[in-house]
Each structure stands twice: as C-alpha cells, then as structure tokens.
Amino acid sequence: MKDVLLILGASGQIGNELTQSLRKIYGNERVIASDIREGNADMMNSGPFELINATDKNQILQIVQKYKVTQVYLLAAMLSATAEQHPQKAWNLNINSLLAVLDLAKEKHIKQIYWPSSIAVFGPTTPKQNTPQKSVMEPSTVYGISKLAGEFWCNYYHDKYGVDVRSLRYPGIISWKSKPGGGTTDYAVDIYFSALEESKYTCFLSENTRLPMMYMDDAVNATIQLMQTASHKIKERTAYNLSAISFTPKEIALEIKKHIPEFEILYKPDFRQKIADSWPQSISDSKAREDWNWQHQFDLSSMTKDILTNLKEQRSTLKL
Ligand code: AKB
C-alpha cells in the first residue's frame, strides 16, 4: 500500500515548505495539507487542503479515513515568545494535538508520526556549549515545558504501544519563502527582509546572543530523511538533537553587510532576551549523524547568499 501523508499545520513556516517538498517526492494527491487557516496560493493550488483544528481528534480521524492517511506530520504549535503570553493556550495546542495523533496511531488508524521538538527543551542549567543528546533538562519557558513533556509522551507511546513516532529538536529555522511567527529565533528571518527593504534592522536580542540555527532546506531534508529511515535504526524515541550553525546577531549582520554594505543593525532587547539566554549556544547532534547519517549543507555564508539572491529575485518579479 502506498503511503498517504497528512500535514497538520501546513500553513506555518515549516509546514508550508515541508508540504511542498513532500509533494515533489510522494505526488501532490498523496500529501494532504491542513491547517486552521488557509495557506499561500502555491500550497492551496498544488494539492488537497482541509481546514482542521489539530486538537480535535475526531476532525483528524475523519480526514484520515477520507484519504486513507498512513503518516501524520504534526507541525501545528505555538512557539516560545507567543506561548509566554498565552501559557494555557500554548499547552492546550502543543500537547492536546500530540495526544490526539498519538492515540490515532495507538488505535491503528495511522502507521507513522512526525512531531517536532525544539532546543527549548533545554534550560538555564543545561551546559551551553555543544549540548549533548542527554543532558540536564530544566526548561524555563511554557513552550520548552510542552516540548519536553511531548518528547516523553512520544517515548511512552513508543515503548508501551509500539507507536512509530519520530522527532527532532529543531534549532531556530531560517527561511525566505515563509515567515515564522512568535518565536525567539525569528529575528534571523526578519533581518533579511529588513536588510533588503530598508537597509537597517532593530534586533530584539542583544548583539552577542549566540543561538543554534539552521537553514530551512536542511531542516526539511533532515525531517524527510528521519521519516524515511528504517525503524530499527531510530534509537532515540524522545527526540534527536539536530544542529547546523550557531551565530550571534552581530555575526549575521556582518555577513549581510558583505552583500549590502550600507546595512545597519541596532539592538533593543525585549522579553525574548531572557528566553534566548536560557537556551544552549550550540548543540551536539552526533547521535543523529551516527544513527541515520544526518549531514547539514548550509553554513552562515552560503545560507545568506542563497536567501538574498532568492529574495532579490522575488522582489524584482513582484515589481514587473
Ligand atoms: C522559537 O524560537 O520558539 C523556535 C524554536 C527554537 O523552537 N524557533
């Protein structure tokens, strides 16, 4: 039987690009996009789309049965900064959506699940450099607490019910096709748009705040690679550390200046500084590299070149 994939949260930053990549691999009709709101024209026009509230198990089940879905990618989530403003809502969305999907797998409606975790599972007491797979985990944000609890729900459903659920601890994901919303690492996306539009950017984190980051192409590849790996090779059923690059606002600004010499950055840290300060500065992902051969492609320089080239091209097409 051929796999049919359902993406919950397909209109979000990662969901959108993941859906497009999966449609290229599995065929448009076998990748069902869904979200609580409609996505961009490319996604809406390239294949099936359903409006779904990801916390509503019955709604998900109806769509699973309608399309004979075998795999669910659950990307719907409230990110770190917004979650601090709405703790209860964040917990409800991040945990109840996961439990709904885990139960569908336990009841044998679906065969495989992807659910993203985050570097936010680590907290102020975790070693900051090269944070290992297994380390102190005392998150100080609602988002981090929900991701840590979620990881252990995944592990529990795998151990107890044999559910094939897989997860990655994403660092900040940087993209140009779709923007993130409500995260602490979002500055590293906004900065490119502002650099091209106004040649200046006011950063909500201080200049030397180092955080683990990754280009969207690498994040999408890692996700697909993890899901295509034979089940017996997946040794971590909480979530895998995943890493590519680490940089500070000052370093990304210097890289942008190589392409836009007049670019200027100002710093006005807000409440997100405290969240960033609680996270690791760099991550060791040797387990992912060992278990399923993970390798990233983009560093800060190649990512910056790729983003600015694509955004410039997009801007000139829009002006035509
Ligand atoms: C956020 O900033 O909240 C996310 C994350 C690191 O998980 N990008």
Image: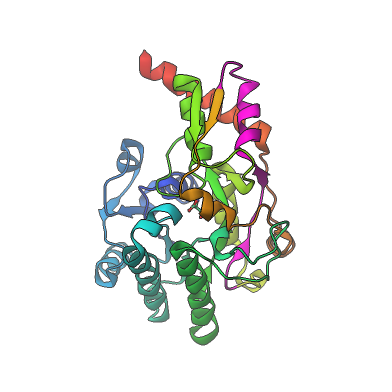
Of residues 306 and 173, which is closer to you in this image? 173
Residue 175 at least partly seen: no
Q: Is residue 94 visible?
A: yes
Magenta stretch?
237-263
Relative horizontal placement of residue 206, taking residue 182 as reference (left or right) = right
Q: Which residue is drawn at 53% across and 30% down?
A: 266
**Residue 308 higher or lower than 77, as above or below:** above
Specify the farthest residue to the top: 320
Q: In which quarter of the image is residue 30?
A: bottom left
Q: Is residue 62 left or right of residue 149?
A: left
Where 118 falls versus 319 (above or below)?
Answer: below
Q: Position of residue 128 (x, y in %)?
A: 69, 58
Q: Where is residue 225 in the image (x, y as percent from the top left)?
A: 60, 56
Left or right of 209, for residue 187: left
User: Percent from the top left, x then y, of residue 260?
Assistant: 58, 18
Where residue 157 sits in the image (x, y, percent)? 49, 80
- Viewport quadrant of the N terminus: bottom left
